Amino acid sequence: MSLVKKFATVASGTLMSRALGFGREMLMAAALGTGPVADAFNAAFQFPNTFRRLFAEGAFNAAFVPLFAKEIETHGTDGAKRFSEEVFGVLFTALLALTIVMELSMPLIVRYLVAPGFAGTPGKFDTTVTLATIMFPYLICMSLGAMMAGMLNSLRRYFAAAVAPVFLNIILIGVLGYAWYKGSDALTVGYGLSWGVLAAGLVQLAIVWVAVRHAGISIGFRRPKMTPAVKRLLILALPAAITGGITQINQLIGTAIASAQNSAVSSLAYADRIYQLPLGVVGVAVAIVLLPELSRALKSGNLIEAANLQNRSVEFTLFLTLPAAAALWVMSEPIVRLVYERGAFAANGSTPTVAAILAIFGLGLPAFVLIKAFTPGYFAREDTRTPMMFAAISVAVNVTTALTLFPRMGAPGIAVASAVAGWVNALMLLGVLIRRGHWGRDVPLMKRIPRLVLSAVVMGTALYFAEHWFAVRLGLGSPLVVKATTLLSLVAGGALLYFITAFATGGADFGMIRRNVKRGSGKSAPPVAETELDE
């Protein structure tokens, strides 16, 4: 199965989730706008979501996957099963203890960490505490689910783990649809969404648990014990958790700072949902697929294959994210107007602020995706300390910039801080990979990058003039169908122009695409469930 096909497998599940996420956010914007309940829900959900990225997806995709792959290579399926059960026992016990402590401390956590700006508004503060208390057990489900997703990715079974998040959006859309049908008030909607998040966590855990059993590995509960393998995992996982969740750390910091201004938290959340579409479809897919593939290549001593995997991944991410970044920068306001401007959102007049945040996020998009392409180069070599140091520097840059810009710019200042921190992190990761000789000079890649940038600039310029030409059709008074067809036509035309320019200038060629689609993944997968590895 080729690298691009594996990216596509993961991206298809992520695309479904992101597309439904758009529907969810459209309904939420109409129901809650950027009002106090929207601020409370987004701040409360940010907290368990950040922990999920820190201690689940970030840590286990970075630390667990290489160790699990090594167990399969050295001790076969039985060794991998034993290692998984040891980890499961320790993880479940630690998560249960953490959840109990956090639930009891939630008022203090919201007051001093999550949303200190809400403390002066008693109703808003109390609502945030209650919603966060309901949703925090979601962490247990998603952390255990992330471990099992890491197992599936190591076995080259990508689809179940990629499609599971779809059910969060399905359930929340159902909650919002029911609330609209019943005519529920904003506070009732907020409570319904919180219980929906918890239910979705249980459903997602069930999906990956069944998929792991279907892959031939049944996980039983073992008494928590610090075995050498578990100790090694924890040594790798702590810095990996911080590194893998750096974007979420910065978002949590941004949420805390933004809580000092009404509507800022929800404005950031709505813009984040849109830019998460290209970030998730491309960046997450690359990170999930690249780490196990790179780990296998390095474990087998195939350095040429490892270098090729890294270069082709960067080539793939830039080919798709540069035009997305240009489109978000130029077309942010028409996009926000189409997706959100109705109901309570329109009444609040939130479009200009959310559009400005989205445009700035667009400039940071290539950096956020490149971070996901660069970090596997460290994690696959079991070096999680160096990216953690860079993540800490990135957080410092983010905090300093956000505190400097927020008083003058409001929520867009936080977006600027996030984008700057992302680029600083990406450049540091690349620089050290090159200095250590872990990133070889790839002549085709070096030639294509400036040509892809040029193609994106040409597309962005054309979209800028086209947006002004069709301003009436994209404006506030235009019917929804007219706005949608006009915007989609402009996006399609811009994409066509980008691809034509990229192929004409040599930024891309059919030979490159053909080689990536046909190229195998290197060393064959372990023998477990061998006939179904390419599902």
Image: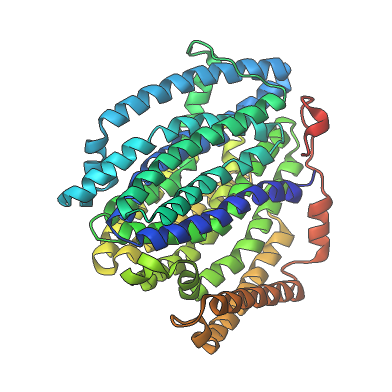
Q: Is residue 86 visible?
A: yes
Q: Nearer the viewer, residue 144 or 427?
A: 144
The C terminus lies in quadrant: top right
Asked whether, in this view, residue 118 is left or right of residue 202, the answer is left
Q: Is residue 517 above or below residue 381?
A: below
Q: Nearer the viewer, residue 467 or 502?
A: 467
Q: Is residue 294 visible?
A: no
Q: Nearer the viewer, residue 189 or 238?
A: 189
Q: Position of residue 121 (x, y in %)?
A: 17, 52
Residue at horizontal 44%, vertical 62%?
271
Asked whether, in this view, residue 329 is left or right of residue 218, the answer is left
Asked whether, in this view, residue 10 is left or right of residue 405, the answer is right
Residue at horizontal 57%, vertical 46%?
166
Q: Is residue 217 above or below residue 420?
A: above
Q: Position of residue 72 (x, y in %)?
A: 70, 23
The N terminus lies in quadrant: top right
* Residue at the bottom extreme, as displayed: 469
Q: Is residue 34 above or below residue 14?
A: below
